[in-house]
Image (cartoon, coloured by chain):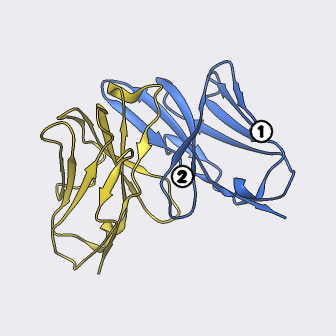
């Protein structure tokens, strides 16, 4: 079982739709969490950090559930420009530092 | 430059050839990471440096892979006797603080390695 798992999708949604992605992690010592966005043939870029209390940045909302070991990303009012791969990222320190990426969830937003 | 710079952007190597991939992190960034990304997959951790110290190399797939960061800035990932399964995009990332917990990692554009 991979340390960080995501539904690979693809999610195909119309413009204006609300879409949610989940990510589960297996290491209970994980300490910080992020969502990165990666466009085709580009490098990953930070979308947002994920805090225990949940956080929102415009149309994007991220939540963390430590008890169930999953994080989520909600995108409201989807835009064509939201089409990308969304990578779940987990940092943990258990004797050694690790930053683990999920395999990504692909989103296609269509007009 | 302001960002992480990697070179070359593209490399075609014949099977058995040695290659060296370079990463220039953002100036002053303590942490540096190398990742391998196969087509359609997320980045897979290879190794981590804190300044010049290689603190974790558990992700290096074999002893043909070697990374160094001798002066705590530029890093080189070397692959000896390349094999076809080494074909991937190699991403370098840096972040400001040690351990990079709760801090953003900035990625270079990657080196696309194709072994023929």
Which is nearer the eye, A12 or A80?
A80
What's the residue at 64%, 33% (across, down)?
Answer: A71
Mark 2 burial class by Cα count in 10 Å: few <14, some 14-19, many 20+: many
Residue A74 image offset from top left, x and y in percent: 75, 39
On screen, residue B6 above or below B116: above
Question: Color used for chain B?
Answer: yellow
Label 1: few (<14), some or many (≥20) within 10 Å?
few
Number of numbered callouts drawn: 2
Q: Is B20 in front, or is B3?
A: B3
Residue that sits furthest to the left in the current view: B70
The dot on residue A103 is 2
Q: Quadrant of residue A111?
A: bottom right
For label 2, the SS is: loop
Q: In which quarter of the image is the C terminus of chain B?
A: bottom left
Colour chain A is painted in: blue
Per the model, the C-alpha gap separating discs 1 and 2 is 23 Å
Left or right, B115 with reference to B17: right
Choose between B81 and B70: the one closer to the eye.
B70
Q: Which of marks 1 and 2 is nearer the N terminus?
A: 1
């Amino acid at each position: 079982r991979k340390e960080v798992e995501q539904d690979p999708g693809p999610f195909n949604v119309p413009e204006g739709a609300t879409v949610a992605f989940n990510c589960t992690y297996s290491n209970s010592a994980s300490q910080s969490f992020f969502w990165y966005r990666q466009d085709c043939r580009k490098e990953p870029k930070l979308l947002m950090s994920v805090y225990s209390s949940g956080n929102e940045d415009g149309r994007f909302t991220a939540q963390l559930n430590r008890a169930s070991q999953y994080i989520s990303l909600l995108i409201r009012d989807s835009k064509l420009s939201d089409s990308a791969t969304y990578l779940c990222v987990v940092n943990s320190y258990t004797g050694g530092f690790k930053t683990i990426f999920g395999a990504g969830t692909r989103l296609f937003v269509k007009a | 430059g302001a960002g992480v710079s990697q070179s070359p952007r593209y490399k075609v190597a014949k099977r058995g050839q040695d290659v060296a991939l370079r990463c220039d992190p953002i100036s002053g960034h303590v942490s540096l990471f190398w990742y391998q990304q196969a087509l359609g997959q997320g980045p897979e951790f290879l190794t981590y440096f804190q300044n010049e110290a290689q603190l974790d190399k558990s992700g290096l797939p074999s002893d043909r892979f070697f990374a160094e960061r001798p002066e705590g800035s530029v890093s080189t990932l070397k692959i000896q006797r390349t094999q076809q399964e080494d074909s991937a995009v190699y991403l370098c990332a840096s972040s400001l603080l040690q351990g990079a917990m709760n801090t953003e990692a900035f990625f270079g554009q990657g080196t696309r390695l194709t072994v023929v």
